[in-house]
Each structure stands twice: as structure tokens, then as C-alpha cells.
Amino acid sequence: PFQNFLKSLSTIDENRDKAMFLNLENYISSNKLESEKMYGFMGVFHVMQASYNSSEPFVHLLKKKFNKAKITSLIGFYTDATMMMPYNGQMKMMIPAEFAGQLWQAYPEFGKTQKYLPVPFSNNQSNPVMEKVEHIESLEALSAENSATLFKLSGKNSPFNTQNTFAEVKGAMGITLTNPEDKTTDAFQYLILFRNAQPATPLEF
């Protein structure tokens, strides 16, 4: 473990995704895990198997190193959802105090300490922490309220094998495929739509 720790320090000058890849590669090698199944849970950009914004996400680097057929990516979209976020300096800059007051009125339990905000977290509208995803309405039409619905995009005759719908997100926080020839399933194979997810609430002490 100490040797792994020292090796991880050598990635300090790399970007985050490259450092994640090098650390995992070292961990797999040192623990002889080449034949083991492994699972990860991380932000959407990191799990993309294609290059985006001229950058190489973590799983894109994995796909280049290991067998493509053995790597599967599942991303999540949200509609009409809310997330608990700390109301710190950065969030205060993004969300005006007047809007924060409206959010606390809607969720009184958050207003007691005003340390957290129930922030809109939905890909069917643009808001301070999310971007609207084009055509997400088609997924909503195939799902129910208050549900989590899994979509397999990589079927034999799936249109997502020949188009890039859902693979790119426009806007200030958007992501664009580096290679315009890449399709949706070059980046990920499954999508899960969360509808009407409610925020965790602050603990009372």
C-alpha cells in the first residue's frame, strides 16, 4: 500500500482523469486484478468512453488500454429533481439570496440553519448546476413519475448506434465530442432516467 501511495504521488502534475487512470492501472497491476470484475461510481464526464472537449475522460483511457468489449458505461439524467447542496461561498455567488429564500420557503427544513439549499437538479431545464439535455422529453414519455428507468442504448438495431443523441450537452457546462464521427454508444451504452428525486435533508442535532 505504501508503494502504491508513493506511485500515486507521481501523478500529481497530471490532470484528474489521467491521474485516476494511472492510479487504477497501478492498483490493478500490484494486486493482480487483471481478470477481476470492477465497478465504479463517479461523475458523468469521467465515465464517458469517447474523447470530449479535446480531453480524455477516465473511462476513455481505460478503453484505450483494455478490451473495449469488457467496459460498459451507464450515465444518469434527472428530471424535476432536487439536490441538497451546501450554501457556501461558491453557491452564494451562483444563486442570489432572493432565489435562495424562495427555495427555503419551499423546503422549510432547509431554512432552519440555512447551511444547505434544495437546488433544482434537472436535465429538462437549465439551472445553476445542470444543463438542459435536448430530446430528454422522449425519455420522459417512456417513463413514469417518481421512478428510475433504465434504457439500453446499444441494442442491435438501436438508433443510438448511428447518431449522437444524448451524447452531447450544449450550454456553459456542456460537453462536445472531440470526434464528430463518434456516436452515442461510442461514449456510453446505458442511460438511467431519475424522475422527481427528492433531496436528502439536513440532520437535526
Image: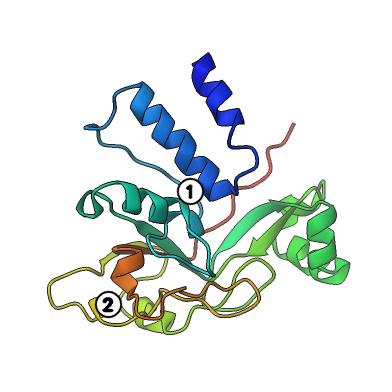
Count of labels in the image:
2
Q: Which label's residue is closer to the chain start, 1 or 2?
A: 1
Secondary structure state at the residue bearing disc 2: helix
In the orientation shown, which residue stands out farthest toward the top? 2
- What mark, if any, has residue 42 been given in the picture? 1
Residue 136's label in the rendered image is: none
Seen from this angle, which residue lies furthest left? 156
Horizontal and vertical percent position of residue 71: 27, 51
- Is disc 1 placed on a helix, strand or loop? loop
Q: As shown in the figure, which amino acid type bears the numbered disc 1?
A: Met
| Left or right of residue 28: residue 162 | left
Residue 138, by quadrant, is bottom left
* The disc label shown at residue 160, or none: 2
User: Label 2 amino acid?
Assistant: Phe
Q: Position of residue 26 (x, y in %)?
A: 42, 30
The quadrant in which residue 180 appears is bottom left
Image position of 39 with respect to 104: above or below: above
> Left or right: where does residue 129 sit relative to residue 138?
right
Q: How is the image coloured?
A: rainbow
Seen at 54% across and 42% down, the residue is 19
